[in-house]
Image (spheres, rainbow, N blue to C red):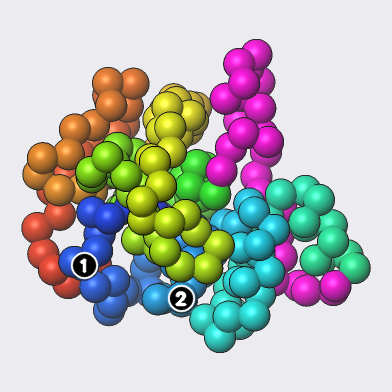
Amino acid sequence: MTSLVIGNGESRKDFTLTNFSNNYKLIGCNAVHRDIEVDHLVCCDRRMVEESIHSENTLNTKIYARHDWFKYYRKIKKDKRIYQVPELPYIGNLKQDQPIHWGSGTYAVLLAATLSQRVCLIGFDLYPVSEKVNNLYKNTNNYSKAAANPVDYSFWEYQIGKVFQHFPNNEFVVLNTPDWKMPKVWNRPNVKFEVLATKNLTFA
């Protein structure tokens, strides 16, 4: 079964994520629940966990949080939708190798790799479209202002590359616009790039 991991980069702003087959697992990050119901939702920030548990679109969603928030919402609040983000598949000595420095998007890709042999990524832009923050939910609650400087994407690039590296038997398909460039560190035999070519992204 294939997992579709939905990032919140602006490359997917013209695409309607509808009519998905039951053969696909939908894995989202943070505020994607505002627009679509997903099977799995990763929220590393407590503010996003709090928002997600009150959403009408998460009644049947598994919500993944860091260890502390998992303990609080699952053990104390007794919310059975809350799960803990997966353990990293390796041990490293760099700052970006530490679990606390992994975010919702990178954990979502890791989660997908543990759930499916084939994983498609959409909305994982990395680079800013302009000189400012690249996120569909900018200027909304719990997100940066549109005028904010872009986030340094080097950790995302490195960490997603680590997922590709440590799941060599998985197939990863990165979907993005024709002018998007895939990072060199992602160039592996089990990773390929495909162009988003339709406004209604459907999987039959």
N-terminal of the pair, mark 2 or mark 1, is 1
Q: Residue at x 37, y 68 (%)?
A: 23
Q: Residue at x 61, y 16 (%)?
A: 94
- 93 or 154: which is nearer to us? 154
Inspect this view and state whether residue 119 appears: no
In the rendered image, which quarter contains the N terminus? Answer: bottom left
Estimate the x, y position of residue 2 in percent, counting from the top left.
Answer: 37, 56
**Separation (CA) of disc 2 from disc 1:** 15 Å
Seen as rendered, the residue at the extreme bottom is 56
Pointer 2: what residue?
34
Q: Secondary structure at mark 1?
A: loop
Picture quadrant where residue 188 is located: top left
- 137 or 181: which is nearer to us? 137
Picture quadrant where residue 137 is located: bottom left
Residue 6 against residue 39 in the figure, above or below: above
Pointer 1: what residue?
15
Q: Residue at x 61, y 63 (%)?
A: 48
In the image, is 44 to the left or to the right of 75?
left
For badge 1, the amino acid type reads Phe
Q: Residue at x 56, y 43 (%)?
A: 103
Estimate the x, y position of residue 13 in percent, counting from the top left.
Answer: 24, 64
In the image, is 180 to the left or to the right of 65?
left
- 164 or 79: which is nearer to us? 79
Estimate the x, y position of residue 165 in percent, counting from the top left.
Answer: 44, 25
